[in-house]
Amino acid sequence: MTTLVLLRHGLTAMTGPVLAGWTPGLHLDERGQKQADAVAERLAPVPFAALVSSPLDRCQDTIAAVRGRLAAPPDVEVDDRFGECRYGDWTGRPLKELAKEPMWKVVQSHPSAAVFPNGESLAAVQARAVTAVRDHDARLKLSHGDDAVWLACSHGDVIKAIVADALGTHLDLFQRITVDPCSVTVIRYTELRPFVVKVNDTGGDVAALIPPKRKGRRKKASSDAAVGGGAG
């Protein structure tokens, strides 16, 4: 039962009022660095088997803060499939301006049909991101076993798309999911189904992410859900 921790990057000068997309050279601002340092402190006890990141600077800054607090940090692997949506002609434009565009309503109510001018579609973003998750997850399960915990640092829409897939929710409903800067989202993957453990967590305890010490032969991880809700 491998566990994926999805971490959104911290704040930048463009986060919120402007659609940053693949804007080059966009690093965390002072607020974002404080967020990254705080989440790094929270995640420090977790023995990550792998650290994977979007190539964009704001994610690189965030995951560097996390890596700097780990006792035995693996190298950071860069995977373009966790990169931000390529918003094309929308990149760098204020959101209040984009909200007047006809396609804004498509993005809000029918995102599976949204294709950004001279960019990519949200459906393509979900496809590449979910494929990346499955590729890394399968590799880490073979190399580190079912207890492997790994981290991917990415972007809001990308993480929302991964969560929607894990929930079995159509992409058209992914705007119901919130992913704040430097929030932690956790998904456990089993043979039968994923379990969404945390979404948009900005301050909770992460002790449950630390794999238990095993004595003797390992039991195969169960894909069964806890009927009745379980005891946590």
Image (cartoon, helix red, strand yellow):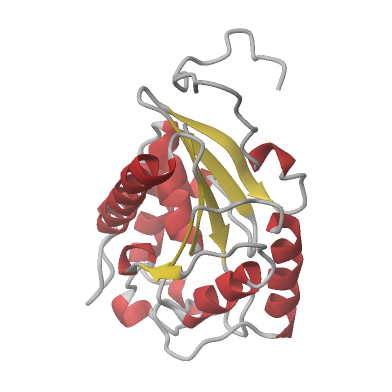
Q: List x then y, in percent, for residue 132.
A: 31, 54
Report whether 4 appears left or right of 172: right
| For residue 113, above or below residue 192 | below
Residue ranking furthest to the bottom: 25
Compared to residue 196, the image places residue 200 above or below, namely below
* Residue 231 in the image, given as x and y percentages of width and height: 72, 16
Where residue 33 appears, x then y in whole percent? 70, 79
The residue shown at (33%, 64%) is 103
**195 to the left or right of 46:** left
Viewport quadrant of the C terminus: top right
Instruction: Depth check: give the residue in front, 201 or 38.
Output: 38
Residue 15, visible in the rendered structure: no
Q: Looking at the image, which residue is at 47% across and 18% down?
A: 222
Residue 133, x across and y down, in percent: 36, 49
Mark yes or no: residue 23 visible: yes
Image side of residue 197 versus residue 221, left or right: right
Q: Residue at x 51, y 77 (%)?
A: 60
